[in-house]
Image (tube, helix red, strand yellow):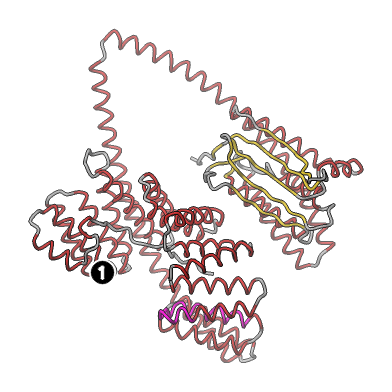
Amino acid sequence: MKIKLLFLFLLVSVAVFSQNKTADSLINVLNKTKSDIDKTVLLNAIATEYMSSDPKLMQDFASKALDLSKKIKHRVEEGNAYLNLGNSNVISGNYPKALDYFSKAQEVFESQLNIAIENKDAVRNGLARAYGSIGIVFSEQSNYAKALQFHLKAVKIYEENKDEVRVVRIYNNIGIVYQAQKEEFKALDYFIKAQKIQEKIKDNTVGITTTNIGNIYLKQQNFAKAFEYYSKAKQLFEKNPDARGLGELYNNLGSYYQQIGKSEEALNNWEKAIGVFTSIDDKFGISDTYTYLAKFYFEKGDYSKALINSNKSLSLAKELQILEQIMASEKMLSEIYQKQNNPSEALIHYQLFSQAKDSLTNHENIRQSVQTEMNFDFEKREALQKEEHEKKELLFSEKSKRTTLITIFGFLFVLLLFGIGFLIYNRRQLKKSLTLQKELAEYEQKALHLQMNPHFVFNCLGSISSFIVQNGTDSAIKYLSKFSKLMRLTLEYSKESLIPIDKEIESLQNYLELEQLRFNQVFNFSITKNPEIEDDMALPPLLLQPFVENAIIHGLIPKKELGQIDIHFDLKDQSLICTITDNGIGFEKSKELKEQSVSIHKSMALDITKKRLEMMENVTNKTSQLDIEEITDENGKSVGTRVILKLPIQYNSPKS
């Protein structure tokens, strides 16, 4: 399933004069206007009108707006002209030039932020559009770190201005950037945020966002949630028609039904996708669907049908000159002919696949070269802007100091100097003492954390030994692969006293998947968190793992029915609440069983965890709390255990 930036949009200037008027009527108004200020506004508005119909005219009018705005020193419209010029170059695919124009727009709007002008909102909106446009260029160039940096700058301004329409677009772009970086949890957070706002403001594009959410759940193999959101997206597309979005939805539904083993439903949805794409002459979408069908029939061993669909996909890919699709189709054809014992045709198509691959590599090398040059120029410009800003700040600071010094009387100055010296001395002494105490507590906490790693390793090695004896070679290899990934994460986290919550979630998910393999899927699990939890909110690594392990070994394994573990992260009363709930045999029954077979390692892990909580209290001067509750039904019968960890909110400090 490929990632498409469905919400890639151009953040353009919309002037008052352009509302509900065509380009022709605006040109008539322009010819009658004598004010140069009004002319610059109209020229930018006309350029915006031509964006979707004639990028060349858009560039012409934007250039005229730029020249006139520079002449009369109208900085806001100068920035809007740069935005229009950047957008016209994005449409024509000239990303380096587009980035140059967007950077100039950013420089113009930033220079106006600290100036007392009436149209402050126009400046802030223009700056947000510049940030968002720069983010789009970097995203198109696969420079996701930079794209995310500028998208977050843009969304901050839109949130402050309560511009929900643009907030939704940026949220989707951020979600897709995270999805491209394979950070599904963060992507899902932003898609859900966007969907909630879209439902509130009745945005017609909510179907695309809902499809994006379904795609995340499908990738996580949460089939129930994926189908729920796909069904909702289908209803939304029926209400607000979007043929391209509906076609993509049918393709995704085809993948969903294929993964759950419903072949007829999968084929039915792919046929619907072809019908929708054909109705709008979307040859790229049709080619994509034929690829799905070819892979489906290939996996089923129906090589004749796989061959037909691969050839159809290849024909459209050649017509559209899409190298990636040509390469994929030629490779599929080679594999099909190989299966049909036709080595000569297999060799021909493999050679064609190699040629397409080489062409794609050359194309990518050229793109990378252009991107490197573009990034260098951008970084250079950004450094110069930062240096200029620092000079202005320094000049302002020096003027403020001189003004302060002139107003202070001599004898007060001496007294103040003495007081400051005394205060600095005491502050340094106090800071030194507090720093030593904090470092000591952190080293103690790291030492306790390192004690847990051998315990965890011994448990996993014992599990692997048991698993290899009880299962086949293939299953053992799969188990070892997941174990090596978990160990890599564990060793990585051992270096840190705090890790982001998303990293802890990733570690827990790998551990639970490992235990699912070990115990033959005798339990399911879910990990959720409150969307209000910030990205840099953190907690000590491997803090929850002993409780999850305890829930599996002593709660779920003794139970005969299918088990369930739910882990949830929440915020309450300025505290981070971590809840682990299982539907096992319960705390009291588990205690009875443990009296007959005492688990020394488990008691060590729980004791160490309690000490880690004590260390956390020493570092933060805030209370932490551990509660273990037995869950009972109406008849007082135990139906599970709940562990609640109340932790002080801490943040992951960036590395210097």
Task: Give above or below for 7 relative to 629.
Answer: below
Where 548 falls versus 485 (above or below)? above
The x and y percentages for residue 21 are: 22, 64
In the rendered structure, which amino acid carries the disc numbered 1?
A: Pro
> Which quadrant of the figure has residue 241?
bottom left
- Residue at 47% from the left image edge and 57% from the top image edge: 199
Q: Residue furthest front?
A: 634
Please tell me whether residue 279 belongs to the stretch shown in magenta. yes
Hey, which quadrant is residue 399 in on the image?
Answer: top left
Residue at left offset 20%, top offset 58%: 17
Can see residue 321? no
Q: Residue at x 32, y 62 (%)?
A: 96
Figure quadrant of residue 340: bottom right
Would you say residue 254 is visible in this rendering?
A: yes
x, y (%) of residue 46?
20, 63
Left or right of 73 on screen, residue 174: right
Q: Is residue 87 left or right of residue 307?
A: left
Q: Is residue 366 left or right of residue 411?
A: right
Q: Tell me, yes or no, whether the highlighted magenta stretch contains residue 44.
A: no
Q: Nearer the viewer, residue 358 or 102?
A: 102
Residue numbers of the magenta segment? 275-298
Spot the residue most to the top: 411
User: Quarter of the image containing the N terminus?
Assistant: bottom right
User: Could you tell me what secondary structure mostly forms the magenta stretch?
Assistant: helix
Q: Say which residue label 1 marks.
A: 55
